Image (spheres, rainbow, N blue to C red):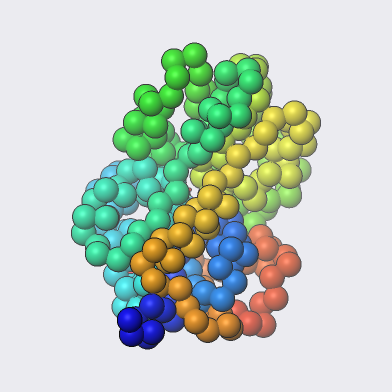
């Protein structure tokens, strides 16, 4: 076989309604440290969770078209709201591999002893077909308690992930779930892992918090391997585009060395 056909040095594209997908990006660079990545955060239009499906579809397709012009070889939808509402349409429209993220309810169902699972996510994710389908496939004795985390995405978009005032809002969402005796909490929005420290503080480390980002990174590696799309370069390039005015990578991922990273602000589509 021609060797050149078994690798591909084009970048992976990662998109989210804003900065939340950085929680996925940081797992992807651990699992695939040689792959170049272009990230697009649509912070100017964030949050997507309260928007109509038609609007979410138009905005997402604009970003994918932008990433395809940059020659991305695979797209990761690092946004539950987008994945659960329009993933099938996207896969029908585009021929490149698309990896989706969805609330890890099946993983939680495997681990729960109390048979009570909490899901914290956006309204858009709760409405999504994919989420409903997963729920229906679970054993009947497992109860899923859904909580919409209105306002949490906005906190992360402002970079206020350690602000003491978040505790009050988080308690408002977590207390009803804890009252249901949950032992698993599924983070059904990629912005929420940035609030993990405060969530753990409230739940006193008694609840297992499930973030599917690692699983998405693993799935991406498998897809690239199966499609013979892995890079053969050793040094990756990381580029970030945002439609917003500021980009909070240094606030959200303080361990990242920004010198090796290109950041483009205000990329209007
Ligand atoms: N990070 C997105 C998600 O995972 C946030 C959605 C939104 O913008 O409402 O759902």
Q: Residue 251's x, y, as percent?
A: 68, 63
Residue 129 falls in which quadrant of the image?
Answer: top left
Q: Residue furthest top?
A: 141
Residue with the most extreme left position:
93
Which residue is pictured at 27% across the width and 48% down the height?
Answer: 88
Question: Which residue occupies the foreground of this view, 4 or 171?
Answer: 4
Q: How many marks?
A: 0
Q: Position of residue 173 (x, y in %)?
A: 60, 29
Does residue 177 show up?
A: no
Give 100 or 254, whichever is nearer the viewer.
Answer: 100
Q: Is residue 210 left or right of residue 244?
A: right
Q: Judge whether residue 24 can be spotted in this image.
A: yes
Q: Residue at x 47, y 55 (%)?
A: 219
Q: Nearer the viewer, residue 189 or 229?
A: 229
Instruction: Judge from the rendering whether residue 143 lies leftward or rightward of residue 254; answer left or right.
Output: left
Look at the picture and state if 34 lies above or below 32: below
The quadrant of the image that shows the C terminus is bottom left
* Residue 52, percent from left and from top: 30, 44
Residue 7 appears at what percent x and percent y?
41, 79
Residue drawn at (58%, 56%) of the image? 23
Above or below: residue 113 compared with residue 204: above
State which quadrant residue 27 falls in: bottom right
Relative to residue 36, is residue 56 drawn left or right?
A: left
Which image quarter is the N terminus in? Answer: bottom left
Question: Which residue is pictured at 62% across the width and 47% down the height?
Answer: 193
């Amino acid at each position: 076989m021609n060797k050149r056909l078994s690798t591909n040095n084009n970048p992976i594209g990662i998109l989210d309604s804003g900065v939340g997908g950085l929680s996925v990006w940081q797992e992807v660079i651990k699992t695939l440290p040689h792959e170049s990545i272009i990230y697009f955060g649509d912070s100017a239009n964030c949050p997507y969770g309260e928007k109509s499906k038609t609007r979410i579809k138009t905005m997402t397709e604009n970003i994918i078209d932008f990433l395809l012009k940059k020659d991305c070889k695979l797209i990761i939808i690092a946004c539950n709201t987008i994945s659960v509402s329009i993933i099938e349409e996207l896969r029908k429209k585009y021929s490149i591999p698309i990896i989706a993220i969805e609330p890890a309810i099946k993983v939680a169902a495997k681990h729960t002893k109390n048979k009570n699972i909490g899901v914290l996510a956006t309204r858009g994710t709760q409405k999504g077909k994919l989420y409903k389908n997963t729920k229906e496939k679970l054993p009947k004795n497992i109860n899923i308690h859904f909580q919409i985390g209105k306002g949490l995405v906005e906190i992360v978009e402002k970079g206020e992930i350690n602000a003491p005032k978040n505790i009050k809002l988080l308690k408002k969402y977590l207390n009803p779930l804890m009252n249901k005796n949950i032992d698993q909490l599924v983070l059904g929005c990629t912005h929420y892992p940035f609030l993990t420290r405060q969530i753990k503080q409230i739940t006193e480390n008694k609840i297992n918090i499930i973030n599917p980002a690692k699983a998405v990174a693993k799935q991406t590696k498998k897809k690239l391997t199966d499609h013979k799309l892995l890079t053969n370069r050793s040094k990756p390039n990381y580029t970030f585009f945002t439609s917003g005015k500021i980009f909070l990578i240094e606030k959200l991922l303080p361990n990242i060395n920004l010198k090796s990273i290109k950041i483009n602000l205000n990329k209007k589509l």
